[in-house]
Image (cartoon, rainbow, N blue to C red):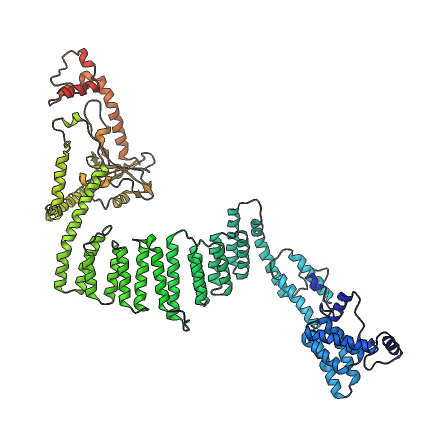
Amino acid sequence: MEEILSLEGETNSIPPNSEQHQETIVNGNPPMPGAAQNPTSPGSDGPDSECESGSDSDSEDEAEQNLQLQTLEAELSSKPCNYEAHVQYIRLLRKMGAIEKLRLAREAMSELFPLTPTMWQEWAKDEASIGTGPEAVHAIEKLYQRGVLDYLAKEKQVQRIRTIFHRQLSVPLVNMRSTLQAYRAWEMEQRNDLGVESSDLDGVPSHIASAYQRALEGYNARVHLEEQILRQDMSESEKLQQYMIYLEFERSCGDPARVQVLYERAIADFPISSDLWLDYTRYLDKTFKGANIVREVYCRATKNCPWVGELWVRYLLCLERGNASEKELASVFGKSLQCTFSTIDEYLDLFLTRVDGLRRRLLFTAEVEDVLNYSLIRETFQNASDYLLEHLKNMDGLVHLHGYWARLELSLGTDLVAARGVWESLLRICGSMLEAWQGYIAMEIELGHINEARSLYKRCYSKRFPGTGSEDICRSWLRFERQFGTLEDFDHAVQKVTPRLEELQLYRLHQECKSIVKRENPLKKDAHEKRKPGSDIIKEQSPAKRQKDAAMYGKDKAQDSNLVGPNKVKEINAKVEKENSRIEQQMKDAMTGKTKVYKDQCTAFISNINLKANCEDLRNFFSDVGGVHDIRILHDKFTGKSRGLAYVDFSDDAHLAVAVAKNKQMLLGKRLSIARSNPRKSRKDLSGHESQMEHVDAANQIDATGGSALNAFAETSKEASRAPQSASRRRGNVNIEITGKNTFAVPRNVKPLGWSANKPETEGDEKPKSNDEFRKMFIKK
């Protein structure tokens, strides 16, 4: 701005390439005087001119001038853009008085360079000295007009400087007040009185003042953000976060130029931040869709962060929006495949993006390049299959790729055989994937090839698919025959599918039983417990017996088909009715205010439950198990909040075993701990009885004072814990008879058969037997 201000009002200033400027640089002397003072100028007269002419004739002779003239002409012939040669040539011709050559020399120079104001004036004077009449006057006017066009008039120059000031004052920059003061001073120099004693904006045009105020407000709003990103006492992550806050502010203001400049500043500080590049390119795609500037930014982004697959994908889309050539698209795609991405899905997305672009250009572009044809799409699909096969085997991504390929073989390639070949190649690789067969079948049905679709069902209905896929394909075949087949076709499908479904159901039951046995892993009991009369422990089978049973099971599975026959259905219905009746009874008890007692005969104890979980959440969690009889979540007796513990009663041991098998599964973000509730193991009273733990339904029985029935249970537990001590103190008053054969092994607090309170106590009765003594007595028996 200072340089601009220094030029104010000088409309006749010497250009840097002018004659006088060149003479000053080359010779180190001030410019020579104009042609009006030259004694050889045409039309010059007076005694001074005659003296100068005489001095020139003494110093230079005609031969020397001719030699110099030839040298300059040769120089201009070889180097026509030599500014200094033009100036010297015109000066020499003017001295020699060669008017015609002088006119041609000036015309030649004016075509290449702007003549200085002095040169234009000399030319006009020379033409005026040799010509008279109206025609000469008209020619001289044209020369002056040409001279004016080479240089701006003063008013235009002043207006340009004023416009630059106005632009600067409308932008939020540092030291805006000093810029305003410089502008006011400049205006005063142009004889525009703005008032020295007035405020800064007095006398300033209203539109300039309002623009200045808006810019000042913008600066005040951004100065804090600028200070934050310029701080030196923060980490890199904090600085990047401050940049993102600043960018969010600029985006809200809606000035794309400022947003782009700020992004570039952030990129300069964090050139390998993939998140920053992604955010930057996403903004450019939205704001400058398809512009060259976006393409250039993507080029830099992929160079700085080549490991980000999304950048390459969006780069290809940007090139396609900008109507880039196939050569450029293929080059970028080839570079992307040479990079290393973190996931295989990024490679898949890149291949699919390339195919999408080729498909769109073949279908929707009016002018198709000669190199574009369907063979490029087929080649891209084949490369993708070869490249991704090892990593995407038996995954949905590979099925999606081949399904897309087969559709394009039909629509663009018009080759049904090739489309079937795509599916067949996939089935050879991923024949155990249900989705691959379903996609192939769907294509044949869509084309109306019913027989081909039926043959595919016949090929795959007996295959084993993960999860419930085997059952799904069988049911899908039946639906297909209902919609497209004859009655004979439907009967044939039923004949094939029904045994298969029964076999699959039997297999699932067998696998569930094996899983239950494996996960329960019960502890082995002692040998003396196995020999107790009336014990419910089943003796372990011998290896020969197990082999015999296994052979019988494997030999004829049809004998076990009763498990899934009508009897099994009746059994399941009976259990359901029983469960419904128990639920109804539970609801009646809750309505009448009865306190229900639970004995944990078939109960699962669950811990580590999310405190926000309720009974409905637990019921949904065990919905696949079934047989849930009741759910009790334990609550704190003072706060009433859940303790993360619960008891779940089941209708039978089979459902309980399946429920326990769900141990360590997740519910509402917590990994549940599920075990069978065993009160006998943990609640033995010292009187010899294995008391069964009784729980009160604390969730529903809330008294009027805000307490719960759980308080009653707590008091009962306390009494039970004090019972053995009181029993031992009142030993003489206890008169309990034990029936059975093994009365010799009765604990000390239980009186043997035939005990009488009147009999005196002996020393042997007071001394309890140890565990070893009990064991030896048991082995002897």
Q: Is residue 667 left or right of residue 249?
A: left
Q: Is residue 302 visible?
A: yes
The image quarter containing residue 538 is top left
Residue 657: image location, x then y, percent? 21, 39
Residue 179: image location, x then y, percent? 67, 59
Quarter the N terminus occupies: bottom right
Q: Is residue 559 left or right of residue 724?
A: left
Residue 18 position (above or below residue 683):
below
Residue 205: image location, x then y, percent? 65, 66
Give whichever of 567, 599 is nearer the camera. 567
Residue 685: image location, x then y, percent? 22, 24
Give whichever of 540, 770 is nearer the camera. 540
Residue at (76, 68) in percent of width and height: 23
Q: Is residue 116 visible?
A: no
**How many numbered badges does the structure rendering display?**
0
The image quarter containing residue 67 is bottom right
Residue 63 position (above or below residue 181):
below
Quarter the C terminus occupies: top left
Residue 573 position (above or below residue 643):
below
Q: Is residue 693 left or right of residue 742?
A: right
Residue at (11, 42) in percent of width and height: 552
Residue at (37, 54) in percent of width and height: 345
Q: Is residue 395 left or right of residue 450?
A: right
